Image: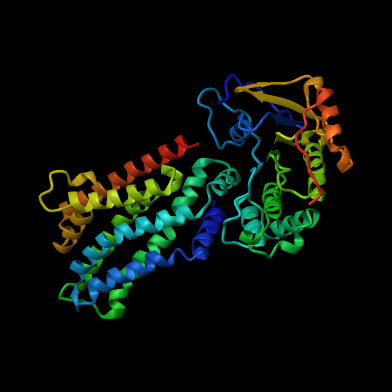
Amino acid sequence: MLRGVEASVAAGEAVAVVGRNGVGKSTLLKLAAGLLRPQRGAVRDRPPRIGYVPERFPADQPFTARRYLMGMAAVHGLAPADAARAVGEWAARLHFDGLLDHSLAELSKGSAQKVGLIQGLVHRPDLLILDEPWEGLDATTRMEIPMVVAEVLARGGRVLISDHLGEVSSLPDVRTWELADGVLSSPTVDAVECVIEVAVAAADVDAALADLRAAGHRVLGVRTPS
Amino acid sequence: MSALVRLRLAAFLRTGRALAPLLTVLVVLGVIYGGGEAQAAEAYGFSAALLFPVVAWQTQILFNVEPDTQRQLSTVAVRGLAREIAAGLLAALVPAVTLVAFALALPWLLGGITGPSVASGVVAGVWAHLLLVPPALLLGALASRAAVGNAARGLAVLTGCTVLAFVVGTKGSPVPWLAPPLLPTARATVDGLAPGALTLQTAVAAAWAAVALVGYVTLRRRNT
């Protein structure tokens, strides 16, 4: 799926892997995380503490969120007191503290995704790998992602993040890798796409869409009030 | 790694799926000891052979309880596939040994053991049970979704290997080494553990466990 990929992420650097669905972004991230082995070549100098946040958190597990997060913090090597403190802090920050004692299976997709985020952050990773972290998150939590990334970078960590919706534009000082047809490239700034959300009067939607397309922009979707 | 062992054991127990193998063992032991008192060596020999598929099945259940993505999170958290694999096998060892201890203790509670040479029979029985734990555990691991990709294939591996083990283990089989030595171990236990038989069956069980371990690790590495 991927070939000839040669890339590195420096300390204090964030890299966004962009590309359409199914192009291999998650595969690249799993290679970086050590979850896949390259058939040829190698992944070298992987930092010891990695935080991996999958695109979909597996919520079908027989735990409450607190029990699961405490368990994963322990697996990451945290002592119980440190684990409790880290879980509490991250839960409060992501507005999840009210759901800590709920069963994972009861959580909504967005809430389950927050559990996925917290388990990847509790141990202060040196390399944070976020696979489409905005999927399913509410607006408030989405705004936390750039801050989380900035904090990891500030302490000399690395961040690798995948995105197919153009959300990376909200990230601070992010370098972009574009993945297409199995080949990785660093596009110029002009080639990087951003997503702008615009509110338009319902009566003007068709005209606005036509204008945007005429100007050469891609329209990703239209949300109408329910 | 011990934290991951605890987390996996907790998941296994909380799903309630641990009950199915436990109830099966109760039925198996009920059949063995329900008819009255038996010689220790004879009863324990067949108890060990019949416990083999249950331990394998229990291990497969324990492995399959964990969603595939969670297994990936665990691998990252323990920093590598080798530790993740070791944590899985150690987690499976705990209920396996518990099941064996239960199988060894139950006949005493039921008054199902009798005969002139109880002590030697118990020693032989403990040997037979412990001998078959590693191959059973590794068969369960080989039949897990993590190794073979899906539950249907896992069921085929589990039942196929178990049936094969009983078939090739019959007396006079030309290829008894082709599968874990269930019936040869039972026979060796009943016959009073001659040193030759003890060494041979221990070697076959160890070799089979080693091959299964290599197979499991290879499949896991291939799937990553």
Across and down, in percent, residue A94 comes to 78, 53
Left or right: residue A165 compared with residue A201:
left
Give above or below for A7 relative to B106.
above
| Closer to us: A57 or A46 | A57
Identify the residue at horizontal 71%, vertical 39% (top origin). A126
| Closer to us: B41 or B224 | B224
Identify the residue at horizontal 66%, vertical 25% (top origin). A179
Visible residue check, residue A199 = no
Visible residue check, residue A117 = yes
The number of discs equals: 0
Identify the residue at horizontal 61%, vertical 22% (top origin). A181
Give above or below for A219 relative to A64.
above
Across and down, in percent, residue B194 comes to 15, 57
How did the renderer colour the structure?
A: rainbow
Across and down, in percent, residue A2 comes to 58, 24
Quadrant in which residue A151 is drawn: top right
Give above or below for B124 relative to B164.
below
Q: Extreme left residue here?
A: B172
| Closer to us: A27 or B137 | A27
Identify the residue at horizontal 70%, vertical 30% (top origin). A17
Left or right: residue A170 compared with residue A183:
right
Quadrant in which residue A128 is drawn: top right
Give above or below for A41 relative to A160.
above
Across and down, in percent, residue B121 comes to 21, 68
| Closer to us: B150 or A115 | B150
Quadrant in which residue B153 is drawn: top left
Left or right: residue B137 compared with residue B188:
right
